[in-house]
Image (tube, rainbow, N blue to C red):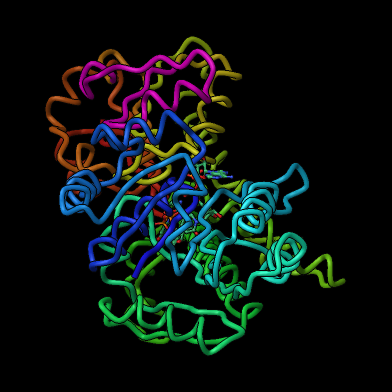
């Protein structure tokens, strides 16, 4: 099948590449000349494990091309995927300006029947909006459809190639057939529904996962007061298949480009139909508070933060990505600095992006240089470099053996063995100095 993907970011590039890998002819279109030039030169604008090799393979096979020219990109396509950004507006609503601009452009260029599929996360009703915009520009026949994306950053290729379901919101048999056929190689459960339901499935899924995280974080906060261990509570809960063990890792709260924005957006979607989505409003509040608990823990260990060197390990919102969008580290570092602390940070891949959003951020290229002479080590991302850290060496180079662990990376036994003060999430604070 001939496919055009508009928007070559985390979603468009991964989906386009995976669709080409199953034998389709894919053209990825982006208006960012720099991105397209990089891709044409075999460089990948984002960090995503396995992506470079898969792009290379499919470009070589002649199935995957990149362009800034939408007319060329969509001319031969039977299916056009729209994967542009839908960032939050100031009030939390999804900003549809990029979606609407693309819909207009498609309407102006439509040369024959195509299915225009929204892959971006969009508020319920956007499919109809896109249809109206395109209709106002052309008399050519077309269908709109919704095919929300569920990949996670850091495991995006795996998630796409092993998708647990595909959701297809359609209004015509023709669109259903084309999209079902496209998903056949993935051997996955295909949920065929109407466009509004498909759009809602995406927000409901993200809101539910975010709820699980805030729920376990609140349990963790209670555990700390009652001598219970949240990691064991989560294990005990997760063995019940009705609950499930995933997304029960207590920590510093969720970040990234999706959960924070999509929870806010679904609150707005509800608000617009006169409904107060109480659960998710509280999920958001708990998540925001959770970040600042890290600073409270630091203060508990150090007293004043004035002039103290805090080594921050991990900046990205999760491991295996360079994405800094809404990373909890941003708020936490700003707060530490506001309280007079001096921050030196380490992240295996996100340092450059972090410097663009955290003014004056000092980073080091080596984890042990970062913690050298530190008054406290703060763990914000559970990179494998953190899990594999040499605790004996840490003990040697720090000024004070204090670890505040926002990801529960270490066991209390290890802390006892090496003699640390250790405060984590939802477990008792121990002082083995
Ligand atoms: N990042 C994720 O993990 C993820 C997962 C599932 C769903 N989503 C959703 O997918 C959508 C895209 O997210 P992303 O993270 O890939 O965004 P992104 O910002 O990484 O990429 C969007 C791309 O669209 C391009 N673009 C904007 N307007 C354009 C136009 N008129 N023509 C061509 N290109 C244009 C931009 O230049 C950019 O490269 C969002 O709605 C997001 O909520 C994201
Ligand atoms: O038990 C957990 C699981 C996750 N997180 C945090 O939650 C955030 C999001 O993690 P994850 O869901 O793994 O990454 P994303 O790439 O943001 O993916 C989410 O957002 C995407 C965009 O909509 C969806 O496509 C995915 O299905 C959905 O998992 C990160 O900050 C994690 O640290 C926790 O704190 N505890």
Query: Residue 232 location in percent, x, y?
Result: 32, 67
Figure check: 135 above or below 315: below
Q: Quadrant of residue 404?
A: top left
Query: Residue 152 location in percent, x, y?
Result: 38, 57
Magenta highlight on residue 403:
no
Which residue does the image show at 47% across and 57% down from the upper left?
A: 75
Which residue does the image show at 54% across and 60% down from the upper left?
A: 214
- Residue range of the region highlighted in magenta in the rendering: 343-370
Quadrant housing the N terminus: bottom left
Looking at the rendered structure, the number of numbered marks drawn on it comes to 0
Query: Residue 379 location in percent, x, y?
Result: 35, 36
Q: In the current view of this chain or complex, which residue is farthest to the right? A: 274
Q: Quadrant of residue 421?
A: top left
Q: Quadrant of residue 136?
A: bottom right
Figure check: 228 above or below 393: below
Left or right of 272: which side holds 45? left
Left or right of 44: which side holds 281? right
- Between 70 and 47, the one nearer to me in the picture: 70
Which residue does the image show at 61% across and 84% down from the upper left?
A: 171
Figure check: 323 above or below 33: below
Which residue does the image show at 36% across and 23% down from the upper left?
A: 345
Left or right of 271: which side holds 86? left
- Between 300 and 309, the one nearer to me in the picture: 309
Query: Residue 308 location in percent, x, y?
Result: 44, 14
Q: In the current view of this chain or complex, which residue is farthest to the bottom? A: 173
Quadrant housing the C terminus: top left
- Between 278 and 365, the one nearer to me in the picture: 365
């Amino acid at each position: 099948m001939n496919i055009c993907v508009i928007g070559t970011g985390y979603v468009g590039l991964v989906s386009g590449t995976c669709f080409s890998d199953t034998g389709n002819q894919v053209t990825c279109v982006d208006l960012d000349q720099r991105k397209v030039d990089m891709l044409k030169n075999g460089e990948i604008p984002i960090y995503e494990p396995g992506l470079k090799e898969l792009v290379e393979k499919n470009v070589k096979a002649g199935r995957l091309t990149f362009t800034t020219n939408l007319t060329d990109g969509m001319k031969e396509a039977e299916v056009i995927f729209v994967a542009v950004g839908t960032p939050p507006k100031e009030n939390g609503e999804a900003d549809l300006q990029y979606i609407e601009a693309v819909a207009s452009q498609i309407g102006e260029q439509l040369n024959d029947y195509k299915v225009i599929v929204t892959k971006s996360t969009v508020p319920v009703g956007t499919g109809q909006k896109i249809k109206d915009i395109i209709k106002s520009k052309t008399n050519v026949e077309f269908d709109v459809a919704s095919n929300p994306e569920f990949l996670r950053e850091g495991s995006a290729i795996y998630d796409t190639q092993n998708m647990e379901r595909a959701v297809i919101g359609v209004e015509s048999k023709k669109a259903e057939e084309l999209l079902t056929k496209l998903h056949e190689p993935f051997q996955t459960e295909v949920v065929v529904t109407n466009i509004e339901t498909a759009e809602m499935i995406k927000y409901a899924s993200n809101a539910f996962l975010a709820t699980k995280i805030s729920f376990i974080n609140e349990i963790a906060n209670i555990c700390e007061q009652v001598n219970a261990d949240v990691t064991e509570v989560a294990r005990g809960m997760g063995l019940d298949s009705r609950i499930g063990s995933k997304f029960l890792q207590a920590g510093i709260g969720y970040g990234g480009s999706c959960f924070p924005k999509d929870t806010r957006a679904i609150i707005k979607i509800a608000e617009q139909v006169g409904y107060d989505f109480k659960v998710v409003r509280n999920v958001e509040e708990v998540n925001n508070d959770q970040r600042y608990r890290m600073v409270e823990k630091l203060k508990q260990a150090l007293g004043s933060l004035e002039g103290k060197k805090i080594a921050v390990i991990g900046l990205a919102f999760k491991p295996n990505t360079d994405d800094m969008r809404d990373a909890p580290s941003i708020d936490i570092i700003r707060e530490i600095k506001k309280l007079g602390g001096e921050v030196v940070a380490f992240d295996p891949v996100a340092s450059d992006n972090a410097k663009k959003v955290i003014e004056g951020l000092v980073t080091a290229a080596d984890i042990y240089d970062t913690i050298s002479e530190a008054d406290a080590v703060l763990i914000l991302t559970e990179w494998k470099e953190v899990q594999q850290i040499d605790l004996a060496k840490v003990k040697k180079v720090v000024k004070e053996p204090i670890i505040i662990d926002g990801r529960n990376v270490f066991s209390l036994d290890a802390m006892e063995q090496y003699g640390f003060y250790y405060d984590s999430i939802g477990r008792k604070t121990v002082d083995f100095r």
